[in-house]
Image (cartoon, rainbow, N blue to C red):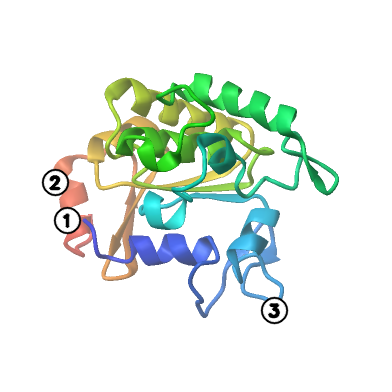
């Protein structure tokens, strides 16, 4: 159920919200003075990618082209750049590759992100975060298939599974139980900002419902 701390949790992990307490990834303290959770830039540099719930406000620069948006966050790396210079040809090849893989429409790297439909904007963000850079260490995906058709949702789910197979931890935040059951290895239910319990994806609606109400399974 929405409003129980899911958004805040994702923002803390992505460096968008300050927190107190203990937070570690591979033994590294995310809340240390130079920890990866101190800023979005530190999180990105530490191999953490984020598919935010608010794609227009948090993930896209709408006046820029699809190609430019696909490079955001990776723009200083190959194939998007050579040293301090933009690699126009490399960036274009990568954009075409991602557009084709995620079937972003229209399939035009020079189309403005603002002119894409909501579903295609979502696919753009998923393509960039999951496949636009090096293998991530942690994927934070918040409602990543909202507004997508069945085929597009499958592609996003496939990319999430591929990240997990490559060694990344994947945190999927979704209000869709069918999606969680199809993708997750385990389901953690938050209630009023705390973990109410953990369940396998095969758990019944009844047991998950009790956790959503803050009761024990």
Between the residue at mark 2 and the residue at mark 3, the CA separation in whole angstroms equals 43 Å
Residues at circles 2 and 1 in contact by the CB criterion of under 8 Å: yes
Report which residue position mark 3 lands on: 33
Could you tell which of marks 3 and 1 lies nearer the N-terminus? 3
Looking at the image, which is closer to me, 128 or 193?
Answer: 128
Q: Give residue 123's quadrant in the image.
A: top left
In the image, which is nearer the foreground, mark 3 or mark 1? 3
Quarter holding the C terminus is bottom left
Q: Secondary structure at mark 1?
A: helix
> In percent of the image, x 42 and y 30: which residue is there?
157
> In percent of the image, x 50 and y 77: which residue is there?
19
Report which residue position mark 1 lands on: 210
> In percent of the image, x 35 and y 52: which residue is there?
198
Asked whether, in this view, residue 91 is left or right of residue 100, the answer is right
Looking at the image, which is closer to me, 194 or 92?
Answer: 92
For disc 3, the neighbor class at 10 Å (few under 14, some 14 to 19, many from 20) is few
């Amino acid at each position: 159920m929405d409003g129980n701390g899911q958004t805040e949790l994702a923002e803390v992990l992505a460096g968008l919200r300050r927190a107190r307490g203990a937070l570690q990834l591979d033994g590294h303290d995310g809340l240390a003075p130079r920890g990866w959770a101190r800023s979005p830039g530190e999180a990105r540099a530490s191999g953490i990618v984020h598919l935010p719930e608010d794609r227009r406000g948090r993930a896209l620069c709408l006046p820029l082209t699809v190609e430019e948006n696909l490079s955001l966050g990776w723009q200083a790396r190959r194939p998007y750049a050579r040293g301090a210079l933009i690699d126009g040809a490399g960036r274009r090849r990568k954009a075409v590759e991602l557009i084709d893989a995620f079937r972003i429409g229209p399939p035009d790297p020079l189309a403005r992100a603002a002119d894409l439909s909501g579903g295609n904007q979502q696919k753009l963000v998923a393509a960039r975060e999951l496949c636009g850079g090096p293998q991530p260490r942690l994927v934070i995906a918040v409602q990543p298939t909202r507004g997508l058709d069945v085929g597009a949702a499958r592609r996003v789910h496939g990319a999430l599974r591929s990240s997990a197979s490559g060694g990344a931890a994947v945190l999927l935040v979704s209000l869709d139980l069918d999606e969680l059951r199809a993708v997750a290895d385990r389901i953690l239910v938050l209630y009023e900002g705390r973990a109410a319990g953990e369940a396998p994806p095969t758990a019944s609606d009844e047991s998950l419902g009790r956790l959503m109400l803050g009761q024990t399974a």
